[in-house]
Each structure stands twice: as C-alpha cells, then as structure tokens.
Image (cartoon, helix red, strand yellow):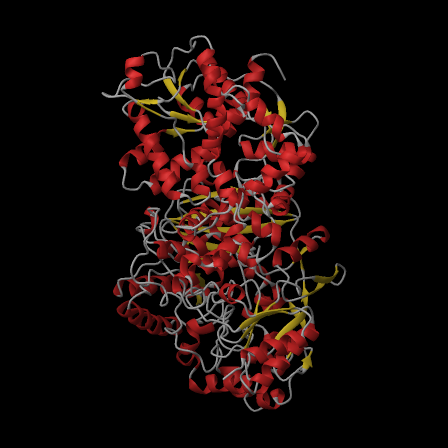
Amino acid sequence: MTDLRELRAGLAAAVRGEVDFGTTARALTTMDASNYRRVPLGVVAPRDADDVAAALSVCRTHGVPVVARGGGTSIAGQATGTGVVLDFTRHMNRLLSLDPRARTAVVQPGLVLDRLQEAAAPHGLRFGPDPSTHSRCTLGGMIGNNSCGSHSVAWGTTADSVRELSVVTAGGDRLRPGRGWAGAPAGLRELVDGELARLRTGLPGLPRRISGYAVDALLPEKGADVARSFCGSEGTLGVLTEAVVDLVRAPRARALAVLAYAEEGGAAEAAAGLLPYRPLTVEGMAADLVPSAADLPRGGAWLFVETGGETAAEARARAEAIVRGADVVDALVVTDPARQRALWRIREDASGTATRMQDGTEAWPGWEDCAVPPARLGAYLRDFRALLASHGLRGAPYGHFGDGCVHVRIDFDLLTGPGVARFRRFSEELADLVVAHGGSLSGEHGDGQARAELLPRMYGAETVALFERVKGVWDPDGLLNPGMLVRPAPLDANLRFSVLPREPVDVAFGYPADGGDFSAAVRRCVGVAKCRTTSVAGPAVMCPSFRATGEEEHSTRGRARLLHEMLAGELVTDGWRSTEVRDALDLCLSCKGCRSDCPVGVDMATYKAEFLHHHYAGRRRPAAHYAMGWLPVWLGWVARTRTAGAVNALASVGPLASVVKRLGGIAGEREIPRVAGETFTRWWRGRRAPSGEGAPVVLWPDTFTEHLSPSVGRAAVRVLESAGLRVVLPPTLRLRGRPPVGDARSRSAARLLAARTGRVCCGLTYVSTGQLDRARTVLRRTLDLLEPVLATDAPLVVLEPSCAAALRTDAPELLHDDPRAAHLAERVLTFAETLERYAPDWTPPRLDRPVTGQTHCHQHAVLGDTADRALRAAAGLTGELSGGCCGLAGDFGFEKGHYDVSVACAEDRLLPSVREAPEDAVVLADGFSCRTQLEQLTGVRGRHLAEVLAAALDGEG
C-alpha cells in the first residue's frame, strides 16, 4: 500500500512545480468529460521536462500510476486516474517558437489550441485540426487522442500535423520520436518487423480510425513514423513534454454553404459525394439537435460545408458550386464572418446541448464518436437509429459526416442497475454494428475506458495482444494510464453517477428544469469546459472569475465538480459545511453567465446561493452578508430618518469610512456609494400628475433606483410618458378587497389603518448572499402587495437588470410552491421591452452617436437584449456593447478579499472597450454595479439607456 506521506514528500522534494494532495485539487481531477470518475492520490503541476522526469521517477519508486492531463475534456475517461495526475495547463502551456517560413511551431503539451491559432493567424497560417473544444483543449490532449475536428476532410487528424515529439517514458528515458524510427524505444522495431503481415492486413484503412494503437504507422512503406504511431496512445506509452507540429496555409476568405435535407439519412448519403469539391468541412446535424432552426434553411437535417478561397468571391463561387451540385431541399450561402460564427456556434455547442433531449431528459457520452467509411454513413445511421429504438433509447447524432464520424449523446440510465446493464448490452451490440459497417469504435476521442474493452470485436484477439506487447515495450511496468487501451477496466465500472445520492437532496430552490433534484442539476456539468475559455468574443460572459485567476476551482466546471464530490461524500466529507466548496464558490460573481453560455445550462449562481443557505444555517455569517445582503433595510432606515446627508458626510471622512468598511466586511480599496438626498418615490409623490394617458405600466422602484440612483427612475418616467404610457408605482399597502393598482400615494387614514405597509423588493441581495429564508419572506410580502397589480394586465417595468432577472428566474424557482411568483415573472419587462411592446409606434429622439459599455451580465444571461438593440438603433446609437462582467457584480466587488479579482474582471472587457471608444461615444451601463465600477476605476460616468434618451428629449447631450 502506498505511503501517501512519503509519496507527497518525495514529489515535493523532487519537482519545482506545485504538488497538491489536498481535497480540492483531487476533487477537481476526479472526472473529465466522460461518464467515468476516479479519485487520484494527488496532482503535480510540472514546470518543465525535468519536473516530469523527476515525478515519474518518484512514482515509479512507489509503484504509483501516472496520468497526464490537459484541458480535461476527454470523453472516454482517459484523463482520470487513481494515482498522480500531471496537470500541464498551469506551467507547461507555452508556444515555444513559430517558424512561418517552415510552417512549423514548437509547443508544450498544456498550450491551448486557440493560443496557437492566434499566434499563427498573422502569418496566414493555422493548425489544421480544430475540435469543437478548441478554446480550451490542449495540444498535448489532442496528440494523446489524435483529435480531428471539423476540418479533417481538408487537413486530416492531429497525427497528420505532428513532425516530432519529446517524450519521457515511465522508465525515465527521454526520447524524440519522429520519422525513420527516430526516438523508438528499444525493442519496438524488432516487434514490428515480426508483425509486418498483420499490420498490413489487419487494420482498417478508413480516415478516422482512432481506436487502438497506430502501429501501422511504423511500416517501412509509411516511413516508420514513431511520432505518428505515438499519436492517439492516450498517455499510455510515454509522457509528452514538447511537440514540433506542422501548420497549414489558411484560406484568406471563407464561405459557408448550409445544405438542407428532408432528413438525416439524406444528408448522410450526400456527404461523401461532396468530397470531390475539396471542401474544408462537411459537418452534419439533424433537427432533433437544434434548439431552434430559425437561422437555418428549411429542412430536417443540414450539412455545413465550408469553402475557402483567395477572395470572398472565390470562396462564395465554390460554395455556390456545391449548392448547385447537391440535391437539397433548401440551401443558404453565408459569407459574413459574424453570421458564420453564429451558425458554427450551433455545431460547436452540440457536445453540450446534446446532453439534454428536447424534453429535458439527460443524455450521456459513451458512444460519442464511432466512424465508418463515408460512403456507408447513411446505411450505418439507419441501422444505428434502429438499434437505439430496439433498446428504447434516444440520441441525436451529429458530427463529421464527410469523414463518416458520428457524435451522439444517448439517454442511458446510468443511475440504476438495470439501466447500467442495458448500457453494456447496447455498447456490445453497437460495437458489432460499427464493425459490420467496416468502421472504427473511435473516430476522434479515443477508446479510454468507454470502448477499450470492446477492441477485440474490432481487431480480434491477436491484434489486441499485439497492442499489449507495444505497451510493454514502452511501459513495461504499466505505470502510465493503466486501464486504458490495453488490459482495460470494464466499460460499466467507475461510473461517476454511482456515488451520488439516490434520493433527492432537501433544497430551497425548485430546480424546475431538473425535476426538483439538486443532484440532477449538478450532473448537468458534463465537463466540456466551455467555462475554461480564456478569452471571449461578442456578448459572452462565462466565466469571468476563471479568466481572472486561471484556476480550475474558479471555473464553472471546477465548482460543479466540487459540488459533485460534496454530494458523493467520499472526498468532500462534511457536506454543506465544506470549506473547500465554500472557498471555490467565494469568487463566483453570480453573474449567471453560465446559465446562458454553458451548453448544458449550469446555473452556478443559483447553486452558490443554495450552498450558502445551507452552509451558514444556524451559524454566524460573514459581515458582508449583513452589511450588503441587508442593504434594502439599511437604506430604508436612512430614507425614513432622512439622514442621507449625514451618512454621506460620515462616509467621506477617511478614518470613519475605514471603520465602517472594516466592520461591514467591505474592501478597503472601495468607496462607499453616496445615498441620494431624495429617494425616487419621494420625488414621485411631489411631482405633478402624470401626463401619460395610454396603457398603465407599473414602474418597479428597485433598491438601487430608489436610494442610490433615482435619476434613472426619473429619466424612465420622462421617456415612458413621452411614449404615451401612464406610469404608476406598485402599492405600498396591502388593502382588503384588492383595490385598483396603486401609485405609491396613501390618502386615506382609515385605509392606512386597515392595511399592511411595505415596499416591493425582488430579494436579490438576500439571494446572492444565500439568505434564502429571508428572501422568501421578502418575496411573499412583495406578492401580497402586488396582488392588485397581478389582477390586471399591467406590466412591471424593472430598470435594474439584476432585479429584473431575480424576479424573472429566482422568484419562481425559490417560491416554486406559490403560483403567484410565476405569474409575477411573466409580467416583468425591461425598459426597452416595455417600449417595444406597449409603445410600438413611438419614435425615440435621434442621437446619432456611437456607444460603448457593457451589456449587463444578467441581461445577457436571463433577459436578452433584442429590444435594447432595436431601441438603440432607432435612436441612432451605433456600435456594439462588450460582453463579460463588470466585476463589481452587486456585493461581490465590495466584499473584502475580492477587489483584485473584481478589477481583473473589469479589465477583461469593460474597461478596454471604454478606453478604446471614440471621444463622443455614449457610455451605456444599465446596471448600478456597472456604473459604480466604471466611476470608481476610471472616473467615467456611465448612464442607463433611459437617462440617455431622457436627456435627448430635453435637448441635452
């Protein structure tokens, strides 16, 4: 039995990189993107090849297996193990050199593919293979799996782009595999020379044969390419430390032909016929995978066929030639790069979106990427669909139709004994079906544990025995990634779901999309790791904390993994009281970006609120939870006592402000926002009668508008009334008999005595700090007050995006037992949505100026900004707002210990966009947090869109 203390001490003494045997590090690496889970002993982040060799030496001495890990996006289980995990993403993640003339690059295994593409692009070059996980997968992982991607019909697999490797074997040898037997371990050539006949006849010759070892690359007529034979070995032969890879010339222009067919079989049968046109891609998907086909030509299945050229006209001409030569129901040729990206996003997100059937049922990998000869794809898919039906299973195939490679997630029941038994039977029968069609069990993602057990069905026992002999030459002690490819673990062992509780966990939120089951909500994270993207474009938000720190535990996936282990109770043993989970969630900004940007809709903001609710139940909370979680109460007291001036004066005195911040758990670097001298509702009561005579709209006086930025409320009233709408405010009295909608005025003392007083509140600050009992109380009081409003058709206009999002999603999910909450959520509209729906003929004033700023993260994730875009366009406000999160995020950026991450998040997208904007640009920031962050970090005053339009109505800039 391994002595963990000695192992840890030996590693710490031998390597210069980090050695972490703690609970968090181990929990973060128990899973990849597969169905499997293994608990490692510890994690080492080597700094260089010397560290790798030293770590292997220590592990060899202790007889401990080693698993090399990159982005952790493997789908067959090969990035998990029970020994020591080598994490290459922390240090060995650099592009060492790039030679444009030779079209080569030297890379370390932890380099993310997109970083290589970005470096190559200015030279008109690129790395050919590009899996859909290109924004987070690593070159080491791609070489280990022999990854392919959508452009493989043009540029082949990763093995086709590898020139030379640097490898450390389990025995400590440092080899440089290449062509002509370069870098071969002792005994490999002799082994191959004795098996030439088998290698020439026993391995299928299809382009996507990824299963097993590529021993045929060692044939003399193929150049005895040791580097190529190493590709796809899944970390079982040696540990990669460096690679020389080939680059290809990227086309100057591209066009995308989207070909529509009546059904999947027609698309599959057509794919092979398009290859003579020499396209860059031939990707396929069917309607059961696409959430909405609104942007696609009419049909039931589609091929995405990309063409290239020196000019846009040449690329388009090639795409149009393909359309003319294809027998299609409908077609679309797209040359606009932005529209192409939007269409490709549908395909790239498929590995996540396919994990939920259209009815919400869970679906899983396991038979993710079989490949058959392209000419047989149509027949194979028909047989595949029939096999699914015979087992009562469902799946949505998609993938690289031009190469005959099909991805699919299937609604296996991996939670019960009978379900797992059916998983095994189906896997065995599907393996036979693939072989019958001349195919490969893996066409891209490798065998891992998911398929290695079935390799004898594809190759026969003697060829699999040859694979074992190859493994023995490279790794005689079997230390490297044992259980993969040869001598495999059973395909139905180590399933990651087996450790989760069988009964639903008692939780506060309703989790309607997961049947009320918190475990099912956590299971949503399948590990595709889109949250680990280090740079985002367009409106995307997820995951700002990971981009700020680069730490897995601060990614959505990392937090989901820790929650999974918390529920499992094996590694994280103290449940809701876990400090590991608490610390990982501490830097979650609750931006809700993952709710929309994660392909499977993980909602970490909700999970964080749930966790904090349980974690602090019956215990003292951090000071910030009281200072900022109860912000509506404190500001209400200031308003009632009319002490805003005194509060602001005290906050401006340095020593006093420091004391207040220290007691309130507020970051010392932060300024305390000024409280308005006159609240919005006090201004409202003192104004003249409303001028609007149109449909009544109820303007929500959220805490921020009411106490901190009433100018936004005043501006909204000005614009809404200019549009002919009648603005009223919610009732502040709960009156008997449901009187008409109130307007925040109380004129009858008798009615006052008969009423319960209060103010509406969305409960946002309580939700974000996990004070869910208090949030429910506040929301129920709000629903009581709003009963007269809910009895009418009047909408609720919410100016603060975070409050609107809380009312639209948090309220009905938290009060899932109160139908009024769902009714309220349906009434919530943003400022722009209100004008679009209730004043469609109103024309806003023209400003004809560029805009800069950031779409509020909650608006992006929950509310949508279509109406805002239309309103800005009508007002002549041109340009795009950036994505990301401002970093202040309600209480997050004010809380002690969060300042640096808060600033880093702002520097990711928001602050650069404002700095680079034209001088006359209008700085838009609808959220109070966004405006505060801008003002405190740059001195720039951002404005709500209502303020901009109101100023224009009054003739101001």
Q: Residue at x 64, y 41 (%)?
A: 668
Q: Is residue 246 above or below residue 910?
A: below
State the residue at coordinates (36%, 62%).
381
Tell me the quarter of the picture where residue 135 sits: bottom right
Q: Is residue 666 visible?
A: no
- Give percent across and percent down for residue 234: 54, 73
**635 or 73: which is nearer to us?**
635
Give the percent coordinates (x, y) of residue 76: 46, 68
Screen quadrant of the C terminus: top right
- 189 lies left or right of 497: right
Write the residue at 39% across / 74% down: 435
Quarter of the image for residue 171 reads bottom right
Q: Disc count in the image? A: 0
Between 208 and 489, the one lying in front of the other is 489
Q: Is residue 271 visible?
A: yes
Q: Is residue 171 above or below residue 673?
A: below
x%, y% of residue 509? Answer: 35, 46
Q: Is residue 684 above or below residue 218?
A: above
x then y, percent, for residue 217: 59, 78
Front residue of 396 and 833: 833
Which quarter of the figure has residue 903?
Answer: top right
Residue 210 versus residue 691 in the image, above or below: below
Relative placement, left or right, of 695 versus 893 is left
> In this view of the protein, which residue sits in the foreground, 158 or 595?
595
Q: Is residue 11 left or right of residue 776?
A: right
